[in-house]
Image (cartoon, grey):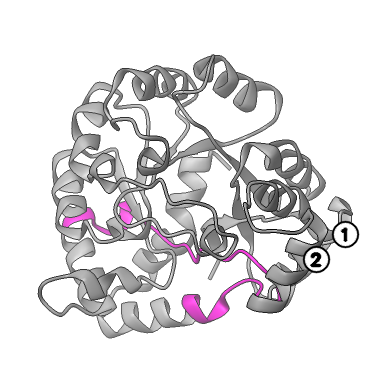
Amino acid sequence: MQIIDFHSHFFCREFFDALVAQSPLPGNDLLRLTELSERTGIEIPEPDLEAHTARWIAEMDAKGLDHLVTFASLPEETAAVAEAARMSKGRMSAIALVNPKAPDAPKKVRKLLEDFGFKGVLIFPAMHHYQIDGPEARAVYGVLAEFKAPVYVHCGLLVVTLRDLLGIRRTQDINYANPLRIVPAANDFPDVPFVIPHFGAGFFRETLMAGSQCANVYTDSSSTNSWTRTQPAKISLRDVFEHALDVFGPARILFGTDSNVFPAGWRADRRAEQRELLYALEVPETEQQQIFAGNASRLLQL
């Protein structure tokens, strides 16, 4: 079976350098990087982008991954992720974090798609405080519609552990992250695939409702899906898949892992878990292939 991971973070050295620069903790940036590595067991990448890219490609080969969609998770990482995708020779697709409230955001998105080879964008309404269907976001969707490029709309819970460990103040406000706000935008921009990661990360019912209303709303299966603990009724990941299949069908669910750092590398365990659940639900192999690769290939125009 072909496997395309629709949700991962590249986290090269530029990402960590930019992140620690925001930390109010005492010490210089190198000291903070060292302390972060010691506290978490994360391997901080060397500045050599080619080596970091080669490591990801080797990881993909070792674990049977055909294609990796990976994010520039901070603006400072954008150029590096674009270059990594180019160096991967078709093995990686790049997605850029965009803040629609930033000056000239639509112009920047056009440049990312036209000149840098990005396949779509990732937005964090809870982090940057704007409405999903507000005017700033709509201006970005207008550009994406021209390219039929996807937008990942992070909804629900948003906890960035690395930021917490570095003492960076939380600014997340999930009042801005309700999947139901996608519905009017998705209706107005039918050529844009709207992807809700992590099954809505706690807003599962709202994700199902948005998916039932709009044929261009998708969801991905990435992360540990620990958000299930926040639901008033006990729900398992198998239950999540069963409900998602009922509403979205196999054509609008995208496999993802949220893989990001070494030594963990690419999370093949999450592929195995999800495959097992889909077999238990007696999902046909042809439909599983849609979830694990076919849908991603179509949205990325591979």
Q: Which mark is residue 51?
A: 1
The image shows residue 53, relative to residue 73, as above or below, that is below
Q: Is residue 160 left or right of residue 216?
A: right
What residue is disc 2 on? 55
Among the 4 quarters of the image, the one containing residue 190? top left
Q: Residue furthest front?
A: 26
Q: CA distance from mark 1 to mark 2?
A: 6 Å
- Image spot of residue 128 (x, y percent): 42, 36
- Image spot of residue 2 (x, y percent): 56, 65
Q: Is residue 62 left or right of residue 275?
A: right
| Tally of numbered tags | 2
Q: Is residue 183 left or right of residue 154?
A: left
Q: Which mark is residue 150?
A: none
The answer to whether residue 103 is magenta is no
The magenta span reads 247-271
The answer to whether residue 251 is magenta is yes
Residue for point 25% across, 61% down: 202
Is residue 131 at least partly visible in the picture? yes
Q: Tag 1: residue type? A: Ala
How many C-alpha atoms fall within 10 Å of the one at disc 1: few (<14), some, or many (≥20)? few
Q: Tag 2: residue type? A: Arg
Instruction: Report the quarter where the C terminus lies.
Output: top right
Q: Nearer the viewer, residue 153 or 216?
A: 153
The image shows residue 114, relative to residue 162, as above or below, that is above
Say whether marks 1 and 2 touch (CB < 8 Å). yes
- Image spot of residue 78 (x, y percent): 68, 38
Q: Nearer the viewer, residue 105 or 166?
A: 166
How many C-alpha atoms fall within 10 Å of the one at disc 2: few (<14), some, or many (≥20)? some
Identify the element where label 2 is drawn. Answer: helix
Residue for point 74% across, 54% down: 12
Q: Is residue 78 left or right of residue 240?
A: right
Is residue 57 at least partly visible in the picture? no
